[in-house]
């Protein structure tokens, strides 16, 4: 039950990304903390 609810929330956040640019970062920290360091590292690599 909890997993289904989480998936629905993620889908909802994806639909409303354009309205709230800060939301994806917050949801990423809450739902996938293990993937956050990788995204930060990739952002740092992309910077000159």
Image (cartoon, rainbow, N blue to C red):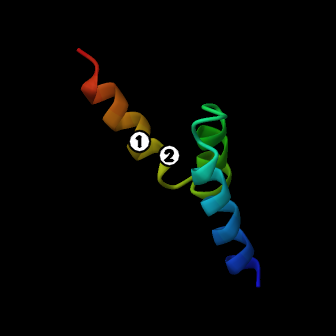
Residue 34: % across, % down: 51, 55
Near mark 1 (Cα within 10 A), the count class, few <14, some 14-19 or many ≥20, is few
The residue depicted at 45 percent of the width and 43 percent of the height is 37
The residue depicted at 64 percent of the width and 58 percent of the height is 31
Q: Which mark is residue 39?
A: 1
Q: Quadrant of the C terminus?
A: top left
Residue 45: % across, % down: 26, 28
- Against 25, residue 1 (above or below) is below
Residue 24: % across, % down: 59, 42
Residue extending farthest top: 48
- Give the SS element for disc 1: helix
- Against 19, residue 35 (above or below) is below
The residue under label 2 is: 36
Q: Quadrant of the N terminus?
A: bottom right
- Against 23, residue 30 (above or below) is below
- Against 5, residue 35 (above or below) is above
- Give the SS element for disc 2: helix
Are discs 2 and 1 less than 8 Å apart at CB?
A: yes
Q: CA distance from mark 2 to mark 1?
A: 5 Å
């Amino acid at each position: 039950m909890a997993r289904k609810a989480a998936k629905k929330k993620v889908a909802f956040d994806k639909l409303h990304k354009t309205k709230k640019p800060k939301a994806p970062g917050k949801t990423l920290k809450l739902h996938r903390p293990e993937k956050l360091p990788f995204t930060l590292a990739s952002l740092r690599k992309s910077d000159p």
